[in-house]
Every structure is written in structure tokens, then in C-alpha cells.
Image (tube, rainbow, N blue to C red):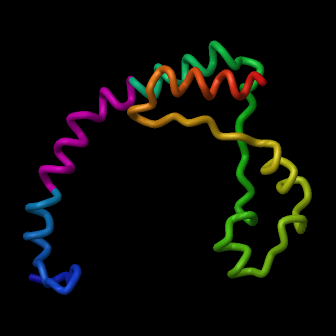
């Protein structure tokens, strides 16, 4: 069995899995509720911000990894740059409170 070093301690793959398996199982048990909540949040955004229903785009060349690796400047791809600069991503995470979503909606409306 292979030892995997973790923070100055070597654990076997089986030991790591014995710790992670219950966490994975708990996440899978919650998956349905998490997806339902995301659908509810998305439906609220759709209802209140219907005019904003164009897909967001993120230009890969704008990410620091690609800028550093390929020495690419943001304006090197002007259309991708413009799409990136004109896009927003709305928060859509498990645990977003209704009042937090209302705050986002009101801020976008302004």
C-alpha cells in the first residue's frame, strides 16, 4: 500500500479514505437538498432579473495563470475581453440567505 505524506505524517491511502468516506457520504446525502436550493435561487433570479438572462462569459486569457504562462495581455483578444468585462456572476451557493439574495437583486437593479 502506498504512503501519502500529509503535513509531516504519512498515512496510507486506506487511512485517508477511512477519514474521507464518511464526508463523501454525508455530501451525497445532502446533494438533493443542495441542488433543490440552487434551483430555487436560480428561479428567483430568473423571476426578478429576467432581463439579465444572457449567458455569462469568462475569457480564459484573462486568468492570471494563462497571462503568466503565455504572456497574454487582456486586450490581445478584444471581443473576449469585452465579453468578460460585461459579464457578472450572481451568487448561487448553498446557504445563501433570502435577505442576501434580495440584497444582490436590489444591487443589480440599481
Q: Residue at x 69, y 73 (%)?
A: 66
From what the image shows, is residue 43 above or below residue 9? above
Residue 77 figure quarter:
bottom right
Q: Residue at x 39, y 32 (%)?
A: 95
Q: Residue at x 63, y 19 (%)?
A: 46
**Farthest top residue in view:** 47
Helix, strand or loop: magenta stretch? helix
Q: Quadrant of the N terminus?
A: bottom left
Judge whether residue 30 is colored magenta.
yes
From what the image shows, is residue 8 above or below residue 14? below
> Where is residue 80 drawn, in percent x and y?
83, 55
85 left or right of 49 in image: right
> Where is residue 88 drawn, in percent x and y?
71, 40
> Where is residue 16 drawn, in percent x and y?
14, 68
59 left or right of 4 in image: right
Region in magenta: 21-36
Q: Residue at x 58, y 21 (%)?
A: 102
> Where is residue 15 drawn, in percent x and y?
8, 70
**Count of residue discs:** 0
From what the image shows, is residue 90 above or below residue 50? below
Q: Quadrant of the C terminus?
A: top right
Residue 47 figure quarter:
top right
From what the image shows, is residue 11 above or below residue 85? below
Residue 76 figure quarter:
bottom right
Amino acid at each position: 500500500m502506498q504512503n501519502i505524506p500529509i503535513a509531516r505524517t504519512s498515512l496510507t491511502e486506506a487511512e485517508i479514505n477511512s477519514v474521507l468516506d464518511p464526508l463523501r457520504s454525508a455530501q451525497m446525502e445532502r446533494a438533493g437538498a443542495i441542488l433543490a436550493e440552487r434551483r430555487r435561487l436560480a428561479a428567483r433570479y430568473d423571476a426578478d432579473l429576467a432581463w439579465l438572462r444572457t449567458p455569462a462569459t469568462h475569457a480564459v486569457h484573462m486568468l492570471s495563470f494563462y497571462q503568466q504562462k503565455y504572456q497574454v495581455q487582456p486586450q490581445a483578444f478584444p471581443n473576449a475581453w469585452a465579453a468578460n468585462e460585461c459579464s457578472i456572476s450572481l451568487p448561487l451557493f448553498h446557504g445563501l440567505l433570502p435577505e442576501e439574495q434580495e440584497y444582490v437583486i436590489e444591487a443589480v437593479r440599481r
